[in-house]
Image: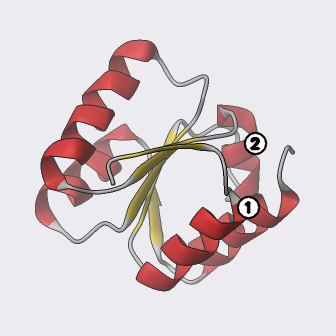
Amino acid sequence: MRNDRFHSILGLAKKAGKLVSGSYSVEKYLKTRKVFLVVIAEDFSKRSSEKFIKLCEDKKVPYLVYSNKQDLGRAIGREIVGIIAITDEGFMKLLKEAAKGENYGGE
């Protein structure tokens, strides 16, 4: 894993019930609930990435293009995950700090 601290925080957010993963769930949460940060895997499909980046920008939700599907999945106990939504402001702040200098957008 590229950033153990970042991935550890994702694991804690999962255990705390403060994240959702997968395209369908993330899209649903972005449209109907409060999302504080979206994490998109660098190897997520270009078309899907563009779709979610536009949705994040429309909803004024910060996003981060970071890591890869395998490492994101491993961090939350799944095989592969291309996109994650963080539903807690505290975890959002921790993740942004852990990923300082990476590919931010939507702010």
Left or right of residue 3, residue 80 in this image: left
Q: Position of residue 85 (x, y in %)?
A: 41, 58
Residue at position x 60%, y 28% in the image = 42
Check disc 1 and give the amino acid type. Phe
Using the image, determine if residue 6 lies above or below residue 93: above
Mark closest to the chain's N terminus, 1 or 2: 1
Quadrant holding the N terminus: top right
Nearest the eye: 62 or 86: 62
Q: Secondary structure at mark 2?
A: helix
For the residue carrying disc 1, how many other residues have a C-alpha within 10 Å: few (<14), some (14-19), or many (20+)? Answer: many
Check disc 2 and give the amino acid type. Asp
Residue labelled with disc 2: 71
Q: Position of residue 82 (x, y in %)?
A: 53, 36
Residue at position x 67%, y 57% in the image = 100
Quadrant of res 36:
bottom left
Viewer-side label of 1, 2: 1
Residue labelled with disc 1: 6
